[in-house]
Amino acid sequence: MFVSTTLEDNLTNKRDFFKSLFFYSFFYLVTTNALNLMKKMTCKQLGGACDHIFEANSFNEMVRLSKEHGSKMFQKGDQAHIKAMKEIEELMQSPEAMKEWIEEKRRLFDTLT
């Protein structure tokens, strides 16, 4: 049996196909976080002393931003940040404790959306 379709039917079918393809592709990107949306953490969440917000795509980038912020606060003589840095310095005396602390922060980062 021969089925004849018109050009208009073919275009409608193709249009519907591409609409569906776009929708499912977008849905996949959003649900898998493949869009690489920025994650946000505060200075306090990273062991600091304030509510300054950092935005980054990776944990390493988040750590870099936190270190830059800490350096600026140290240069300003911010006592709350200097106290937080001393606490982290003490933590560094135990490599195992420091490793666990970093992993805890990484887990927190990984749970963010």
Image (cartoon, grey):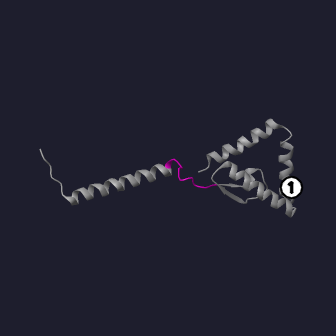
Label 1 crowding class (10 Å Cα cut-off): few <14, some 14-19, many 20+? Answer: some
Is 50 left, or right, of 6 in this rendering? right
Is most of the magenta stretch helix, strand or loop?
A: loop
Residue 43 at least partly seen: no
Q: Position of residue 52 (x, y in %)?
A: 73, 60
**What residue is disc 1 on?**
82
Report if residue 60 is visible in the image. Answer: yes
Q: Amino acid at mark 1?
A: Ile
The magenta-colored residue range is 31-39
| Quadrant in the picture for residue 80 | bottom right
Q: Residue at x 21, y 59 (%)?
A: 7
Judged from the image, the secondary structure of the residue bearing numbered disc 1 is: helix
- Image position, residue 39 (x, y; %): 62, 54
Q: How far across and down, in percent of the image, does residue 76 sit? A: 85, 64
Side (left or right) of 27 relative to 1: right
Q: Is residue 75 magenta?
A: no
